[in-house]
Amino acid sequence: MVASKTVNETKEKLSDLGQEHVFNFYSKLSEAEQKTFLEQVQSIDLNELKTQVDRLVLGNEKEADFNWDALKPADYISLPENGGDSALWEKAKSLGESVIKEGRVAAFTVAGGQGTRLGYDGPKGTFVVTPLSQKSLFEVFANKITRASERYGVAIPWFIMTSAINHKTTIEAFEANNYFGMPKESLFFFSQALFPAVDLNGKILLEEKGKVVMTPNGHGGSLRALVDSGATEKMRKEGIDVLSYFQVDNPLVSCIDPAFIGFHVLNQSELSSKMIPKAYPLEKVGIFCQYEGNNLVVEYSDMPKAMQELLDENGEIVFRSGSVAIHLFDRDFIERVGSASSADKLPYHKAVKKIPFINGSGEYESPKELNGVKFEMFVFDALSKANNTVIIEGLRNDNFSPVKNADGIDSPKSCQKDQLNQAIRWLNAAGVELDISPEGNKTKDFSFEINYRFAMDEEDFINQWNNLKNKPTIELGTIIE
Ligand code: UTP
């Protein structure tokens, strides 16, 4: 039985914070349920919750003034084809390759999100994305990492962050698929922390009579989780100091990109990022900017429309650097920002959502309107805390086509089209003429694939293709592997 002193203290604490309703159904719970409930409530950092509710829900704390006039576009390193220094790119690539060969690089996927927009039941990483071979997101990344390991003759570990909502099912998916061909010892799974969700008045929501609604604390929670889980310690022991960060929903990402790694190391950067020029001024991506001497990402929803639409004398978008959640982290930097005592903690943001809950009468409600607030940290907020940050340009079609929505923009369909366009481009680059073009009509019903186990990027593909003795004819259903 739970000691009444513990119960009273917890109640009192909640009551002091105006959250006494959390205990409304306590007396109706079984003894075992009471115990689990108390454990859950005691694991919550209630002071932190109060701070965030005051700041983000009740608006009691004034946000620091932001001087939009002082905001400038971030500097970035252009691709050679867009005026960048090709000798410098070559230098960066060859440095990056040496760093990979030395075993200093690991891949890192954040996969702790809820994936509500896609509406898929299961860890998002198990969602099938390739048009013909029907591979899941996890398998695509495993193929790319395995190919990079093979190409550079080195084991490349893969860190995967889950959350309590999908940790077990994620590991089961890897086990059931023989770790997608990767050595088991190269994989390291760990969970991020959760944070309570509240209603629009800042009151904690209950998921069951004896359970608080807890949601993953955002991809920014990865820095703390990397430290707490022992991932950074493992990196240190294994001599890994560069972590290649990408999100689970973007199969086009170049998981291990030598030139990007080279620029990162060359500049002794603590955090490097890839930018993609925005496709159109109001594209819904964060924007790399400079403010008071630091690089940072400004969310499109925060930036005034006129600023997003501003064009320079050449007709180019001024604030053009789209952030697509591709970063390289220095291990020491993760430890600095991710440690419990860090003075450089990432701020929380709020996301207003429809969150099912138990109402005052003890009934389950699935709201039709927005009713709740989730608190999330964003990984890109680490940028302004890092030294020597570097931003390089990436080609959209070799880096970014996320699967976020069930239909339309950033959907499985648009992603399959982008995979096909990439395959056409790589073949063209290898000198293979096809009577289809990336945007041609024939691509509508035509599909072929390049297995990322065969080639991890365009340069790799050209070499692999040239070395291939029996080159397949490219026709409907061809898989190059
Ligand atoms: P999104 O911001 O797209 O969120 O995450 P989501 O939860 O996947 O999807 P919606 O918004 O509910 O539809 C971008 C990336 O960050 C990871 C996701 O797994 C995805 O790889 N993420 C997000 C986390 O790892 N933890 C989080 O708390 C949130």
Image (spheres, rainbow, N blue to C red):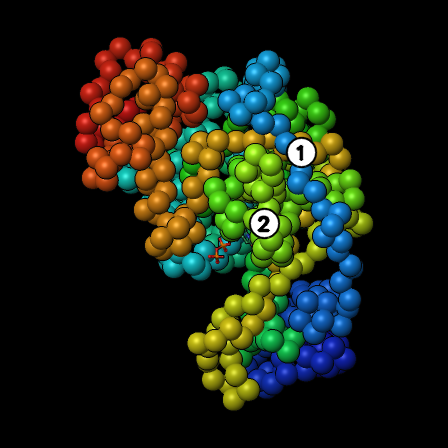
- Count the numbered circles shown: 2
Left or right of residue 339, residue 275 in this image: left
Left or right of residue 167, residue 73 in this image: right
Q: Which residue is mark 2?
A: 308
Secondary structure beneath disc 1? Answer: loop
Can residue 189 be seen in this snapshot? no
When the figure is inspected, residue 80 is found, relative to residue 220, above or below; the finding is above
Distance of label 2 from label 1 (alpha carbons): 17 Å
Q: Which residue is mark 1?
A: 75
Task: State the image quarter where residue 20 is shown.
Answer: bottom right
Nearest the viewer among 396 and 24 is 396
First in sequence: mark 2 or mark 1? 1
Task: State the image quarter where residue 287 is shown.
Answer: top right
Quarter of the figure with the N terminus? bottom right
Q: Amino acid at mark 1?
A: Asp
Task: State the image quarter where residue 94 is shown.
Answer: top right
Select label 2 or label 1 by which is in front.
2
Q: Residue furthest front?
A: 313
